[in-house]
Image (tube, grey):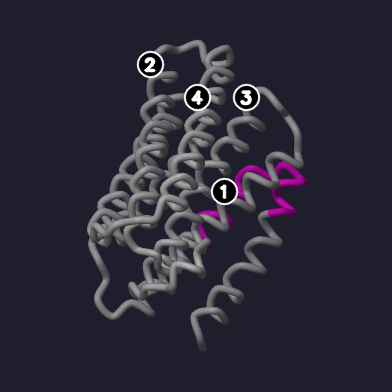
Amino acid sequence: MSLFHWILLLVFPILGINLYATVGEIFWLKQATQLLFIMGILAIYLKQKKRPRINECCFIVFFFLAKFAEFFAISGNYELLSLFFYILAFIALSREVISQTKREKASKVMLLYSFLLFVINAYLLFTHLLELKSYISSDFRFTAYIVYYLNLLILGVISLIYYLNSYSEKSIYCVTLVLAFVFADVFKDAAHFYMQDLAILIIGNLLWFIGLIFSLLFFLTPERKLRLMDLI
């Protein structure tokens, strides 16, 4: 089967069960389906990739460990452990993106677009952290969230630099997965801390799945340049 068929085979059953668990507030089932999805992503990656790369494998493994730690997130310590593994996962992803980046001159249109995208995301993350401050009593826990979101922001900057210097299908997947993870975390925290709304939680979950799917596409897609007109 093609990569597209493998992804479809993985996504629809697990996503359906995950949505059911989310609506029914079945925490363990929601976490189990997300863990199963990560394992499926890893299996597809290892099947399709003839020469696995260390940073890509580390990203998937640390992502799995972070989600596994969320099983025990009733304790604040396990929540911090989950954040720690997510940080390691995104560091591994940043290293992989940097290894793919080759410096080339970008157009003014692309520079302006990337700058605006960075400013908007930085502003959104800053306001999100300000909102979280009033809901997190522990300074250490709040510092962990600051480090986590700074790590995400740095990953966003790196992905934009890669996009500007690549103009490739692979770089589009990279930017898309980063944006998906950023907004998935914002929606998840919003639903967890200060906006207990089912629709927000569902959107956050969908973005989380989209982020992992595009991570797989990023890892498996070879670097092939597109024409500049295809990216504007």
State how far apart marks 2 and 1 are (Cα): 25 Å
Q: Which residues are magenta?
A: 19-37
Could you give the CA–CA distance between mark 1 and mark 4, rounded to whole angstroms?
28 Å
Sequence-wise first label, 3 or 1: 1
Residue 221: image quadrant is bottom left
| 165 is higher (above) or lower (below) than 28 | below
Of tags 2 and 4, the one toward the viewer is 4
Decide whether residue 134 is among the magenta residues: no
Q: Name the residue that disc number 1 marks.
A: 31
- Type of amino acid under label 3: Phe
Question: Disc 4, disc 3: CB below 8 Å?
Answer: no
Distance, label 4 to label 3, CA atoms, is 16 Å
Which residue is disc 3 drawn over?
193
Is 86 above or below relative to 224? above
Helix or strand or loop: what does disc 1 sit on? helix
Residue at the image position 57 percent from the left and 81 percent from the top: 5
Kindly give the residue lying farthest to the bottom in the view shown: 1
Q: Which residue is mark 4?
A: 126
Q: Position of residue 121 (x, y in %)?
A: 51, 36
- Closer to us: 197 or 93: 93
Q: Residue 101 sits in which quadrant?
A: bottom left
Residue 145, numbered label: none
Residue drawn where x is 60% and y is 51% of the image:
207
Q: Secondary structure at mark 2?
A: helix
Nearer the observer, 69 or 114: 114
Name the residue carrying label 2.
Answer: 140
Q: Is residue 36 magenta?
A: yes
